[in-house]
Image (spheres, rainbow, N blue to C red):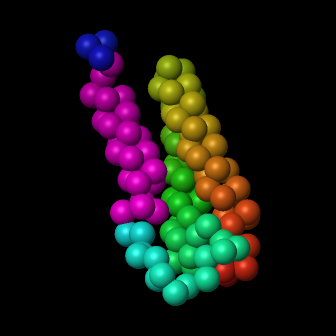
């Protein structure tokens, strides 16, 4: 990473940290499972589903920010930075899509 300027390194560090936080978020504060709770038809509790829903919003929020950054860099003529931001935005969009899939399969009726 010797040929990368400070702003790009900072952006990559922010992206890496955000990915870590988003990926770990549902499991960091995962509530303990009540042994008497009926889990036969469900993989996730209501609390888990709320965290998954938050993960969707967080992922898409970061993607939106990165898409805007890519557009800004493109207008400024910084094609390489624009491409990097765009690729990162796509990855966060896919992460949000994955969270959405989990939510739609396991959490339809648990969280508004």
In the image shown, does 87 or 69 lie closer to the viewer?
87
Residue 40 falls in image quadrant:
bottom right
| Foreground residue among 97 and 81 | 97
Image coordinates for residue 64, horizontal then vertical, percent: 58, 50
Residue 56 higher or lower than 76, as above or below: below
Residue for point 57% across, 38% down: 91
Image spot of residue 83 (x, y percent): 56, 25
The x, y position of residue 87, in whole percent, is 57, 31
Residue found farthest to the top: 3
Q: Residue at x 70, y 56 (%)?
A: 101
Q: Is residue 6 above or below residue 62?
A: above
Which residue is found at the position 41% from the left and 41% from the top?
A: 15
Image position of 5 (left or right of 95) = left
The answer to whether residue 50 is seen in the rendering is: no
| Quarter that holds the C terminus | bottom right
Return the residue nearer the eye: 95 or 61: 95
Q: Is residue 91 left or right of residue 105?
A: left
Quadrant of the rendered image containing residue 75: top right
Please tell me which residue lies in front, 111 or 56.
111
Where 79 falls versus 85 (above or below)?
A: above
Q: Which residues are magenta?
A: 4-28
Verify whether residue 8 appears in magenta. Answer: yes
Q: Quadrant of the N terminus?
A: top left
């Amino acid at each position: 990473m010797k040929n990368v300027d400070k702003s790009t390194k900072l952006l990559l560090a922010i992206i890496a940290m955000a990915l870590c936080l988003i990926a770990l978020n549902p499991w960091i504060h995962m509530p303990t499972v009540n042994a008497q709770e009926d889990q036969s038809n469900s993989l996730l509790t209501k609390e888990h589903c709320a965290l998954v829903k938050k993960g969707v919003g967080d992922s898409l929020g970061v993607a939106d920010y990165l898409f805007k950054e890519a557009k800004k860099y493109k207008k400024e003529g910084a094609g390489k930075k624009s491409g990097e931001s765009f690729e990162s935005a796509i990855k966060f969009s896919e992460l949000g899509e994955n969270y959405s899939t989990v939510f739609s399969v396991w959490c339809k009726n648990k969280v508004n």
